[in-house]
Amino acid sequence: MASAVAPSSLSISRSCTTIDPISAVAQSAMAQSKKPRKPYRPKQAGGAVLARTQPWRLGTEFSMVGDMLRYLLREGALDAMPSGELIYQSPTGRAYTAVTLLRSSTRVFRILRSRDARCPGTEALEHLAEQLQAGQADETRVAAALRCFEALHAYALTRPITDIADAVQTAAIGVQLDKQ
């Protein structure tokens, strides 16, 4: 016959600590090397190596231009305001004036080109902005502008973020001076 154990003889220790799964993952991640897999700004090279810009940082400044050009190439049309201005509605819900968006990005890249001759030209983007202003853009101009923008974007990825930020700030100052 099996012997029964009295419930009072079982003891469960309630002093054990509970492990939070999130903190356990954080601790195991902290135990690993903190060095990124592919450093953007290597410290050991000092100022000798050109530091490149992180793609997500550049995306916050210029992703909507590429999105608008791809949308225009795919759909072939933009929305228009009652005043006649063409509007690009981004997937995030923001609305951008198409001509202003193109002109502001070309202004930034013109500043970068004036500082570095290796920067690709912005002529295709400028021609598309003129055609959109006139309301007669064609598919070949949009495709050329998209190729131009992708070349400019690839160039900007090779530059330090400080150069890009300075060009954006200089362009913003120029816009404010033009308004006055």
Image (cartoon, helix red, strand yellow):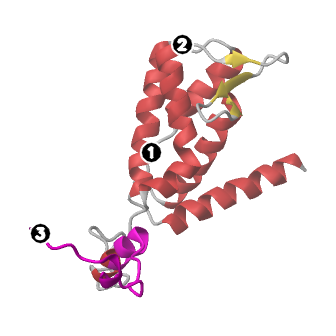
Q: Nearer the viewer, residue 175 or 101?
A: 101
Q: Nearer the viewer, mark 1 or mark 2?
A: 2
Local SS, label 1: helix
Local SS, label 3: loop
Q: Nearer the viewer, residue 115 or 167?
A: 167
Where is residue 79? Give x, y as percent. 69, 17
Q: Amino acid at mark 2?
A: Gly
Local SS, label 2: loop
Where is residue 166? Give x, y as percent. 61, 64
Residue positioned 36% across, 75% down in the render: 24
Among the two numbered marks 3 and 2 on one chain, the one whose residue lies closer to the N terminus: 3
Q: Farthest residue to the front: give it.
A: 1
Among the two numbered marks 1 and 2 on one chain, the one whose residue lies closer to the N terminus: 2
Marker disc for residue 152: 1
76 to 150, vertically: above or below:
above
Where is residue 32? Give x, y as percent. 27, 79
| CA gap, disc 1 and disc 2 | 23 Å
Q: Which residues are magenta?
A: 1-27
Quarter of the image where one finds residue 165? bottom right
94 sits to left or right of 158: right
The crowd level at tag 1 (other Cα within 10 Å; few <14, some 14-19, many 20+) is: some
- Residue 109 visible: no
The residue that mark 2 highlights is 76
The residue that mark 3 highlights is 2
